Amino acid sequence: MTISPAVMEKLSRLGIRNELDLILHLPIRYEDETHMFLISDAPPGKTVQIEGLIVHNEVVVRPRRQLICHVEDSSGLLVMRFLNFYASQIKSYAIGKRVRLLGEIRNGFFGAEMVHPKCRIVQQGESLADTMTPVYSTTAGLTRKVLGRLIEQALQSSENMLFLTETLPENIIRTYQLIGFRESIVCLHHPPPDASMDALQVRSHPAWRRIKFDELLAQQLSMRLHYRQRRNRTAPILSRKHRLIDQFLRQLAFTLTSAQIKVADEISGDLAAPYPMQRLLQGDVGSGKTIVAALAALQAIDNGFQVALMVPTEILAEQHYQKLSIWFEPLGIDVVWLSSSQKKKQKQLTQEAIANGNAQLAIGTHALFQEQIAFHRLGLAIIDEQHRFGVQQRLALRMKGAQSNNVPHQLMMSATPIPRTLSMSYYADLDVSIIDELPPGRSPIVTKLIADNRRDEVIERIRQACHHGKQVYWVCPLIEESETLQLQTALQTYEALSKTFPDLQIGLVHGRLSTHEKTAVMSLFKQGDIQLLVATTVIEVGVDVPNASLMVIENAERMGLSQLHQLRGRVGRGTEASVCILLFQQPLSEIARKRLRIIFEHTDGFEIARQDLQLRGPGEFLGARQSGVPMLRFADLERDEELLIAAQASVDDMLSLYPDLAQRHIERWLGEKTEYLRV
Ligand code: ADP
Ligand code: MG
C-alpha cells in the first residue's frame, strides 16, 4: 500500500504512522444506513435514513439564503433544508430525483424537516448498506472518505493479518469473557446491522470492551516491565539504623501519627534494599509529610550518604531549610540550601560542600540538579510537591549521582492526591504510600462562598480576626495571561487593604520579589509581626504558618480545584478553628460553579481529586507526567474500572507464562512509545 507524502503528513497529525496505526484508528461514531424508515414512522430525535423523490426545489432568501427541497415517500412529505450549499446541489437535487437522506427529523416551521442531512442520489431498488457506516475523526485536508478508504485497504491487506492475530491466551479470554481481537477490530470498523447502536456509541459493546481491555493490559504490562527493570538496577543499601532517628524523635515536640509511622516504615524498608526505591508518598495537605521525609533522610545520612531535597518554589526551599536545620543541626548534620539569590561566593561554597560530601542534606529548587552541581555520594533524592515538576526534571535529578548502574533512591511526595484508578494505571510503575490521617487536634476548615459584592462583610471579618490575635492570608487573583497584570493586581490589593486597615501590619509577597525579600516577609509573618499577608499564588504549596487561621481567596472561580485545595490547606494547620472565604465574581460559568461546589462540599483531598479527574479527564489532570507516558485512547478509567482491575490481574500471568504473547501485545499497542521505558 503506497501513501503519498502529503497524505502521510496529514495522517501523522492524527498519530498514524503506519498501516497498523490505521487499523487502530477506530471510529468516533457510527451512522446506520442499514435500516430504512418511512417519514411518518421515524422516531423523533434519532438519526434515521429515509428515501424519497424530490417533488419541490427552491432557493429562498428569507430570512437568509437557503436551499429548500421537498422529499416525498409513500408515507408523507419532508422538508430538507441547506443553509450552505453549492450551485451544483441546486442542480442535482432536481425534481423527480430519488434521494437517500440520513439525519434527524425535527418538526420545524415548515413541518417535518431535516436540516443539512447527508444526502445522495440513488437508483430505485438500490440495496441497503450491509454494515453500519463508521465515522472517523480526521484532520483538515483529509476527507473522511479518503481516510476511510485507507483504513479499509489496511484492513484488507493480507500482510496485516499477522498484526490481527490473537495475543491473549485462552484462559484470560475465558476468565473475562472477551471476544477475539480480530473479530473486535472488524466489528468496530464495520458493525453488523443488528449491533446495538447505543452500545457502540457509549463503547460498552463487547468489541469495545475487548479493545479497552487490550489497551489497559498493554499499559499494565509496560508499567510492570518498567518496575522490574528498576529492580535489576542497584542502589546503595541504606540499612535501618537507630542512632540518628532515635535521637531525632526524642527531641520532637509531638508524636508521630500511626499513618506516619506506617509510611515511614515502608520507606525505611525500601531504602534497605539493594535496588532503587521509587516511591510516591501521598498525603493530604497538612498530613505531615515533611517529617516522614526527614526520617528517610536520616536513614540515608546515618549510612554515610547524602540526601537532596528538591522543591518547586524558593519560598518552600527556604522554609524547609529553616525547619530541617532546626531539626538536624542538633544531631550534628550539615544542611545546606542552594538558592538562585545567593551571592556568587556563597553559592560556590555551597556547591563545594555538596561536591566534597560535607553537606549531608542539600535543599533547593531545580537549581539542585543543574550541570555544575555534583554530589559526592548521593543516596536519596526527595522531591516535594512532585506534581509541580515535569518528568524531565525528575529524571535529571534521579540521574544525578547515578554512577554507572548505581541509582539513588527516590522519594516523591505529593499533596495532590491521585485517585485510585489513576494510581493503578499511570502510576503503576511506582510504589505508593498513603498517609490517611491528619495529626490530632486539627479543627476542620469551614469554607464560605461569598459573592464579590459582599466584600464589606469579609473586611469586617478580617478586622475581627486580627483583633483577636489571628493571622490572615489574602490571596490575589490568578491572572494566567499576564504575570505583569497579576503583579499589578497584587500591588493594588495591598494598597487598598493598607488604607482599609491603617492599624494592621500588612505584608506583600509575590513571585517577582527576590528570594531574600520573600524570605524576609515570610519570616515576619511566621513570627506574627505581620498580621495580614497579601499574596499571589506563590504561597500555594508547602507554606506552613500554623497561627494563620483565616484565608480569603479572590476570584476563586478562576482557580483549579487542586490549586484551591492546596491554598486552603495553608490554614487549619493549628488548633484554631479556621475559615477559608472564597470570593467569586458573578456570573459563574458552568464549570466554575461545579468547581466551587466541590471545594465547598469537600475537604478530603482524595475526594476532591476524584471529582477533579471526572471534571477534567486524565490528560489535563496528569499535567506534567503526561509528557512521558502514553495516554489511553479508548479506555475511560472511571467507567472501565472493572477492566482496569482485570488487566492488572492478568499481568503476572502474561509475563511469566506467555512472555512472547506479552511482547507482541506491547508492540502492537505501544510500538515506539515503549521508548520511555528505558529511561
Ligand atoms: P504536608 O503534608 O502538607 O507537607 P507538613 O509536613 O508541612 O504537612 O506538616 C503540617 C504541620 O503539621 C507542620 O506544622 C508539622 O510540624 C505538623 N505535624 C506533622 N506531624 C505531626 C504530628 N504527628 N503531630 C502534630 N503535628 C504534626
Ligand atoms: Mg509539604
Image (spheres, grey):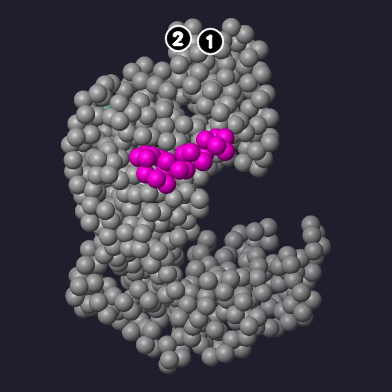
Going by the numbered disc 1, the residue's amino acid type is Arg
Does the magenta portion include 348? yes
Does residue 593 appear anywhere in the picture? Answer: no
Query: SS of the residue at dot 2?
Result: loop
Task: Name the residue carrying label 2.
Answer: 469
x then y, percent, for residue 149: 55, 84
Which numbered disc covers residue 463?
A: 1
**Image-quadrant location for residue 257:** top left
Relative to 140, say whether 599 is above or below: above
- Inspect the magenta stretch and tell me whether residue 575 lies in it: no
Location of residue 678 (image quadrant)? bottom left
**Numbered range of the magenta stretch:** 341-362
Give residue 292's position: percent from left, percent from top: 29, 37
The quadrant the C terminus occupies is: bottom left
Distance in Å between CA atoms under marks 1 and 2: 10 Å
Residue 254, image quadrant: top left
Residue at the (64%, 23%) spot, across then down? 493
The one nearer the camera, 573 or 611, is 573
Does residue 337 appear anywhere in the picture? yes
Give SS at disc 1. Answer: helix
Q: Is 602 situated left or right of 228 in this image?
A: right
**Which of marks 2 and 1 precedes in the sequence?**
1
Front residue of this view, candidates 125 and 544: 544
Q: Tag 1: Cα neighbours inside 10 Å, few (<14), some, or many (≥20)?
A: some
Name the one closer to the observer, 86 or 425: 425
